[in-house]
Image (cartoon, helix red, strand yellow):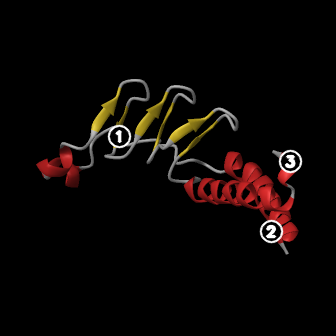
Amino acid sequence: MKGSRVFLGKFLTKVCLHVIPAQDPGIMHGPTEIPPHIAADESQFRDWRFCQKCQIYQGPLTAHCNDCKVCIDELDHHCPWMSKCVGKGNMKWFKVSQQCCLQQHAFIPTIDPLCF
C-alpha cells in the first residue's frame, strides 16, 4: 500500500515537472495605457504601476521577472530548476508538485529507514 503511494507521488511529480514549464505562467502583454474604468476610480488607480522594462502597466499583483525579462501576473517566484516563472497560469500544477514531494518524503522513511 505504501509503495504504491510512493510510486504515485513520484509519477505525479514527474508529470508536474513536464507540465509546469510547458504552461504560460501568466505573461502580461499589456495594457500600454491604463484602462479608462480604472483611471476613473482613484482607489484602483493607485495599485497600478508602469514597468519601464516591458513598457506596460502592471496590475496590483503583477511583477517583472528579471530572469525571464517579462511581467508575470501574480508572480510567485522564478524557479531556477525549471528556468520558468511560477505565476497565475501554472500555480495549480506547482502546488500539486509540492504536495507530491512532501508526500514522498513522508512515506519513504517508513518504507526504507536506511535510505536516509
Upstream in the sequence, badge 3 or badge 1?
A: 1
Q: Secondary structure at mark 1?
A: strand
Nearer to me, 1 or 100: 1
Is there CB contact under 8 Å for labels 3 and 1? Answer: no
Q: Where in the figure is residue 33, as x and y percent of width and height?
A: 30, 39
Residue of label 1: 58
Q: Earlier in the sequence, mark 3 or mark 2?
A: 2
Residue 60 as seen in the image, left or right of residue 45 = right
Residue drawn at (83%, 70%) of the image:
2
The first of marks 2 and 1 along the sequence is: 2
Q: At label 1, which amino acid type do we have?
A: Gln
| Residue holding disc 3 | 115
Quarter of the N terminus within the rendering? bottom right
Q: Is residue 31 left or right of residue 72?
A: left
In which quarter of the view is residue 12 placed?
A: bottom right
Mark 3, other Cα within 10 Å: few <14 / some 14–19 / many ≥20: few
**In the picture provided, is 73 more to the left or to the right than 111?**
left
* Nearer mark to the viewer, of 2 and 1: 2
Residue ID for mark 2: 5
Q: Is residue 110 above or below residue 85?
A: below
Q: CA distance from mark 3 to mark 2?
A: 17 Å
Type of residue at label 3? Cys
Could you tell me residue 14's position as x and y percent?
80, 53
Q: Residue at x 79, y 56 (%)?
A: 109
Name the spot of residue 30 as percent of width and height, x first: 41, 42
Is the C-beta separation of discs 3 and 2 under 8 Å?
A: no
Q: Please tell me whether mark 2 sits on a helix, a strand or a loop.
A: helix
Is 51 rendered above or below residue 1?
above
Alpha carbon of mark 3 to alpha carbon of mark 1: how far?
A: 47 Å
